[in-house]
Image: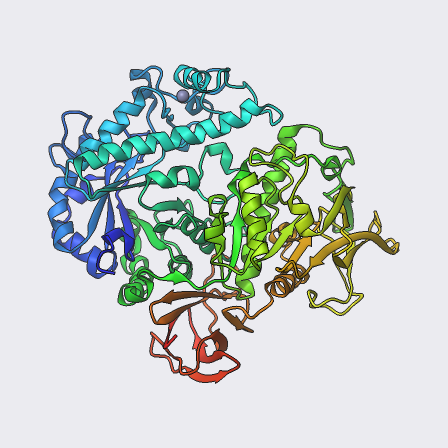
């Protein structure tokens, strides 16, 4: 472990933000500031502002002295970085520069014609959608590129350990500047399509071109950084898993190879009642899937009320969920918040970061003990536009509230951009749905990316969840087939593998045979009310035979192959609420195959997306039981604890490390109070003689039976780590 670099070990990052009042840092006691960060906040890596992200877009001014860039005026001759650096070093903090790379004032843009990102009409993005109310944004392919790379070089000359780039962001509808147009045409032999057109192969190339432009920019920034400091690190605000991410050209699979850490924002905002419980965990596992250190950025701010801290429980859960999933926590704290209530702001972070600092060894070089892999397919997120027309009938908006019934228009949406937007939503909810099912059911799992669909990587798992991974390459399909041929199990949904990696329909989908699909003949009209699935008798079902479940909104009409079982069927459409049911149709809602040699479950419907959106308990059970059946043998752990108790299992030489995060709150977000969970029982597969202890010192009762260590934890507050030795 000693050969690990500092940033490959557990890090706790922080940015203390002074907004426009950077002189407050100049006037502070720098020794005390650095001491406090180390000893009170318990961080070990700090972002120091090098170019500020403040109104009206001052990303072009530096806080340090250089003859190459304008200085942030209020600091005078005072060099914020060089003055502070010795104190950061004294307290063992690794200092990184924060470089705002996406927000520039109109004045600056006007002094540099041709640098702004523009839309197809040639209008700068920042003039149509002023950033944060005022300011614009620049193009990675324009003359700004060299300016920015020199800024990275000059920043590193201050002696920092690395840089974080906040941006660039290629904004929706951009960039059509002359340099981008020329570069695209030189690469693809044709102009950039002027509008979003998913039937045009060049449009898809444009989507990739934008991402490649980001990756090439980062690659060149990194080369400049390494010229100055070969040990320096670089990373950027890389974006996460959310549907529609293609609009801002963010994909960790593209930028990942050129950065040392994968990081993305997961800022909690009050107000959206549907806020996901496992908000930070979903980001952490996705980032971690790229196989390098990951950082989840959680503002220590009450959403857009930046000068108030996150409520204590949310602040702690952000860090706990993140670290439990193998990523590192990061907070930004605004200096004014410390003016408001220093102790209240500090205490939750002090507690959680102090806990993490004390238990670093259990998070160092740990490897996942999961045997289930959930695919996050960014190809599908980018290029999936279903060709099944029936799915786009506008019939899915049925709702009834206060005796008022609303219905969709019934027309079939033909516009591909609208179809794409719907498909973006399906992909989003599918990943979210599976993530929440698995987490709430205490099924240890990793996220794998498209690039992880290789024989070598899949060989680590027993079961692969493809979900609706619609857009896969020939090689990826071959890797999946090889995985099953070697005994791997698969759970797939809907249109898995029906399109190539660019979203073009396949003449023949080799996955169909594996999934037990004979033909796909159409789809039911989407419906959000009064339609059902009837389950039969099968080991893959955890319900009594004959029971009805809500039918997922989107269901294909699929015929199963002769060697498959169809233990659930869709009811004939009822069409209207408060209308009598019309019997069971011939169309399966679930297809099961076994013995080839792996087990396969295929859902011809968007079952996980339904759960992601509606969180109906029946669907959680349906998906989880199907997965358990496909998996065959026992999971590495199992537990009857509530779904709000997150369990993540890691392996280190000679031991397992179990993270338990209690997300049980008082029914509202933000959560005001953690409700302790009593008598948490977890069974962990382990050899006889294995023993366990809780790092908090809590009294664990242990018993051994049937190849598993039974742990009984009398009370779980917010976070616990259990170390299982002798495995
Ligand atoms: Zn451009």
Q: Residue at x 36, y 53 (%)?
A: 309
* Of residues 36 and 174, the one drawn nearer to the viewer in this rendering: 174
- Give the answer, above or below, for where 477 lies relative to 570: above
Q: Residue at x 84, y 52 (%)?
A: 586
Q: Position of residue 518 (x, y in %)?
A: 75, 47
Q: Position of residue 423 (x, y in %)?
A: 62, 39
Please identify the quadrant where the N terminus is shown.
Answer: bottom left
- Give the answer, above or below, for where 522 lies relative to 627: above
Q: Does the rendering let one see residue 424?
A: yes
Quadrant of the displayed image that contains ligand 1? top left
Q: Position of residue 230 (x, y in %)?
A: 19, 40
Q: Does the rendering let one see residue 237?
A: no
- Give the answer, above or below, for where 621 lies relative to 501: below
Q: Quadrant of residue 319?
A: bottom left
* Of residues 596 and 529, the one drawn nearer to the viewer in this rendering: 596
Q: Quadrant of residue 222?
A: top left
Q: Is residue 73 left or right of residue 258?
A: left
Q: How is the image coloured?
A: rainbow
- Give the answer, above or below, for where 503 lies relative to 704: above
Q: Quadrant of residue 12?
A: bottom left
Q: Residue at x 12, y 54 (%)?
A: 90
Q: Is residue 111 left or right of residue 156?
A: right
Number of numbered labels in the structure image: 0
Q: Position of residue 722 (x, y in %)?
A: 39, 73
Q: Is residue 8 left or right of residue 323?
A: left
Please identify the quadrant where the C terminus is shown.
Answer: bottom left
């Amino acid at each position: 472990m000693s050969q690990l670099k500092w940033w490959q070990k557990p890090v706790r990052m922080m940015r203390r933000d002074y907004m426009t009042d950077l002189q407050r840092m100049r006037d502070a006691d720098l020794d005390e500031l650095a001491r406090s960060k180390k000893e009170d906040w318990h961080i070990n890596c700090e972002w120091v502002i090098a170019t500020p992200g403040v109104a009206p877009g001052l990303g072009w001014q530096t806080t340090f002295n250089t003859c190459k860039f304008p200085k942030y005026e209020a600091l005078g001759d005072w060099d914020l970085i060089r003055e502070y650096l010795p104190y950061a070093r004294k307290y063992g903090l690794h200092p990184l520069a924060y470089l705002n790379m996406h927000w520039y004032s109109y004045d600056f843009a006007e002094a540099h014609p041709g640098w702004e990102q523009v839309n197809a009409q040639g209008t700068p993005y920042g003039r149509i959608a002023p950033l944060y109310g005022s300011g614009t944004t620049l193009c990675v392919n324009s003359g700004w590129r060299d300016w920015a790379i020199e800024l990275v070089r000059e920043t590193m000359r201050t002696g920092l350990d690395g840089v974080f780039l906040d941006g660039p962001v290629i904004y929706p509808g951009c960039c059509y500047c002359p340099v981008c147009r020329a570069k695209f045409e030189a690469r693809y032999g044709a102009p950039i399509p002027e509008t979003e057109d998913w039937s045009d192969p060049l449009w898809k190339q444009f989507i990739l071109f934008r991402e490649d432009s980001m990756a090439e920019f980062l690659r060149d920034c990194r080369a400049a950084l390494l010229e100055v400091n070969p040990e320096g690190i670089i990373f950027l605000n890389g974006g996460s898993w959310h549907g529609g991410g293609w609009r801002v050209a963010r994909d960790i699979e593209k930028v990942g190879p050129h950065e040392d850490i994968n990081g993305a924002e997961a800022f909690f905002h009050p107000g959206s009642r549907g806020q996901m419980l496992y908000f930070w965990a979903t980001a952490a596992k996705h980032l971690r899937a790229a196989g390098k250190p990951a950082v989840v950025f959680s503002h220590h701010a009450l959403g857009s009320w930046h000068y108030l801290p996150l409520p204590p429980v949310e602040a702690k859960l952000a860090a706990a969920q993140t670290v439990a999933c193998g990523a590192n926590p990061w907070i930004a704290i605004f200096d004014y918040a410390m003016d408001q209530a220093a102790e209240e702001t500090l205490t939750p972070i002090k507690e959680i970061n102090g806990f993490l600092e004390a238990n670093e060894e259990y998070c160092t070089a740990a490897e996942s003990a999961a045997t289930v892999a959930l695919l996050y397919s960014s190809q599908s997120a980018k290029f999936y536009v279903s060709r099944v027309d029936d799915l786009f009938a506008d019939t899915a908006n049925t709702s009834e509230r206060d005796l008022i019934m609303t219905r969709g228009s019934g027309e079939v949406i033909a516009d591909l951009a609208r179809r794409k937007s719907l498909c973006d939503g399906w992909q989003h909810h599918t990943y979210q749905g599976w993530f929440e099912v698995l987490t709430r059911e205490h099924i240890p799992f990793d996220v794998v990316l498209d690039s992880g669909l290789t024989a070598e990587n899949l060989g680590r798992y027993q079961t692969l969840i493809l979900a609706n991974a619609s857009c896969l390459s020939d090689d990826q399909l071959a890797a999946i087939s090889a995985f099953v041929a070697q005994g791997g199990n698969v759970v797939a949904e809907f249109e898995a593998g029906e399109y190539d990696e660019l979203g073009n329909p396949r003449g023949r989908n080799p996955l169909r045979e594996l999934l037990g699909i004979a033909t796909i003949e159409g789809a039911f009209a989407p419906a959000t009310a009064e339609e059902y699935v009837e389950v039969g008798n099968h080991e893959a079902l955890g319900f009594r035979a004959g029971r009805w479940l809500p039918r997922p909104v989107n269901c294909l009409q699929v015929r199963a192959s002769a060697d498959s079982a169809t233990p659930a069927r869709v009811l004939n459409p009822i069409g209207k609420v408060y209308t009598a049911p019309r019997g069971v149709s011939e169309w399966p809602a679930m297809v099961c195959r076994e013995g080839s040699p792996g087990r396969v479950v295929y859902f011809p419907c968007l079952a996980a997306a339904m759960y992601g959106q509606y969180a109906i308990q029946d669907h959680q059970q349906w998906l989880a039981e199907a997965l358990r059946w496909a998996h065959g043998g026992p999971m590495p752990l199992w537990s009857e604890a509530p779904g709000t108790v997150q369990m993540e299992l890691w392996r280190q030489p000679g031991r397992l490390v179990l993270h338990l995060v209690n997300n049980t709150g008082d029914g509202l977000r933000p959560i005001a109070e953690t409700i302790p969970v009593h008598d948490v029982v977890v069974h962990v597969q382990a050899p006889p003689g294995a023993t366990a202890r809780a790092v908090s010192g809590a009294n664990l009762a242990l018993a051994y039976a049937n190849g598993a260590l039974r742990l009984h934890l009398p009370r779980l507050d917010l976070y616990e780590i259990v170390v299982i030795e002798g495995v």
